[in-house]
Amino acid sequence: MMAAADETTSSTWSDTANTVREEEPPPQPPQEGDVAAAVPPSSRSPVALITAGSAGVGAATARLLARRGYRVVINFSHNTERARKVVGELQQLSCLPAHEIQNEHGNAFLAIRADLGRRDEIGRLVRETVVQMGRLDVVFSNGGWTKFRDMTSIDDNAIDEDWDMCFNINVKSHLWLMQAAKRHLDEAEGAFITTASTAGITPSGSSLAYSVTKAAQIHLVKNLAVMAAPRIRVNSVSPGLLLTEWSDRFSEQAKDAYRQKTKLKCFPTVEDVAEQVLTFAKSRSMTGVNVPLDAGFIV
Ligand SMILES: NC(=O)c1ccc[n+]([C@@H]2O[C@H](COP(=O)([O-])OP(=O)(O)OC[C@H]3O[C@@H](n4cnc5c(N)ncnc54)[C@H](OP(=O)(O)O)[C@@H]3O)[C@@H](O)[C@H]2O)c1
């Protein structure tokens, strides 16, 4: 679960350490169809901004985009050390030439601290990204918030603070981010992608406020796809239960019940979500789409 940041300070962070990568496969050269391959050598590589990007879905997507030739800014709220480590990993995974990963103009990978619960911080996040990177091609608006509640009890789900936080982060933060990024995505003919949830498609998930606001988020995305056309594509991905820190608070029994209910008898993975985000980033033919990635939970 994301908790709202209680600190208002912010920082931009990048790593130039050349650490040895032991477990990851060697960086692959750009393949046909990859964005980096489509960019003329004289241009600077495309830039993706990923909110809530230092863990879970966001970090997995940052890794994939780095492998595919993107420069990446990850956003985080509290854990500077974790964000620093992810930035170091991205540098190692990148298929960009060394002089593009770090040069006198800056770094290809950055972490920017900003609280997604605050509109002014979201505006600053976009401004800092564009100042540091010079362009913005893809925004992956991945932040979400919940407080786990008893899904059999209306009383337990009628807490004002929960609803306010859920609307703020799960709905409004995506709108504020789109508004702040629109001019830059227009210029790049870029993509805006959000992480919704299967809880927004069928009654399920961690709380009623979460389920309802994720449904609102999916509808927001469809409206934004209409409003941002024809230059910007807007889509969402809706994962089922992913084994990230977020879902640590589901009991083992609840997780097992989820898996048993899926047609594929497994959990969806953050890597598959990342692949879907990359597809949205590259595809020129999809907008207003919400893709469930749930191992067949809602079939
Ligand atoms: N996990 C699931 O089962 C599941 C299923 C469906 C949908 N989703 C959705 O997937 C998205 C990502 O979930 P996840 O499971 O990857 O989460 P996660 O593993 O818990 O990752 C949390 C990330 O959010 C950042 N964060 C927390 N509060 C923040 C704030 N106020 N402002 C900016 N960043 C903040 C954290 O940074 P710090 O560590 O620095 O705070 C970290 O980078 C959410 O939208 C969620 O609703 C998740």
Image (cartoon, grey):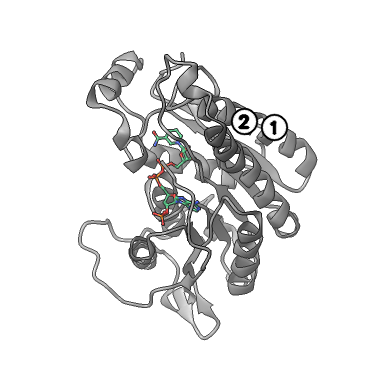
**Residue at horizontal 62%, vertical 46%?**
173
Number of callouts: 2
Is residue 78 shown above or below 291?
below
Is residue 99 shown above or below 89?
below
Does the image show residue 276?
yes
Name the quadrant containing residue 92: bottom left
- The three-letter code of the residue at mark 1 reads Lys
Q: Position of residue 152 (x, y in %)?
A: 42, 14
Residue that numbered label 1 is attached to: 222
Q: Is residue 134 left or right of residue 35?
A: right
Q: Which residue in the rendered view is the most extreme toward the left?
A: 22
Find the distance from the CA under tag 2 to the CA under tag 1: 7 Å
**Residue at horizontal 32%, vertical 42%?**
245
Q: Position of residue 224 (x, y in %)?
A: 73, 39
Crowding at mark 2 (Cα within 10 Å: few <14, some 14-19, many 20+): many
Ligand 1 positioned in quadrant: top left
Closest to the observer: 10 or 71? 10
Closest to the observer: 46 or 136? 136
Is residue 115 shown above or below 199?
below
Name the quadrant containing residue 194: top right
Q: Position of residue 186 (x, y in %)?
A: 75, 55
**Residue at horizontal 29%, vertical 21%?**
254
- The three-letter code of the residue at mark 2 reads Ile
Residue that numbered label 2 is attached to: 218
Q: Is residue 232 left or right of residue 32?
A: right
Closest to the observer: 204 or 27? 204
Say whether marks 2 and 1 touch (CB < 8 Å): yes
Where does the N terminus fall, quadrant-wise? top left
Q: Which mark is residue 270?
A: none
Task: Tell me the element at label 2.
Answer: helix
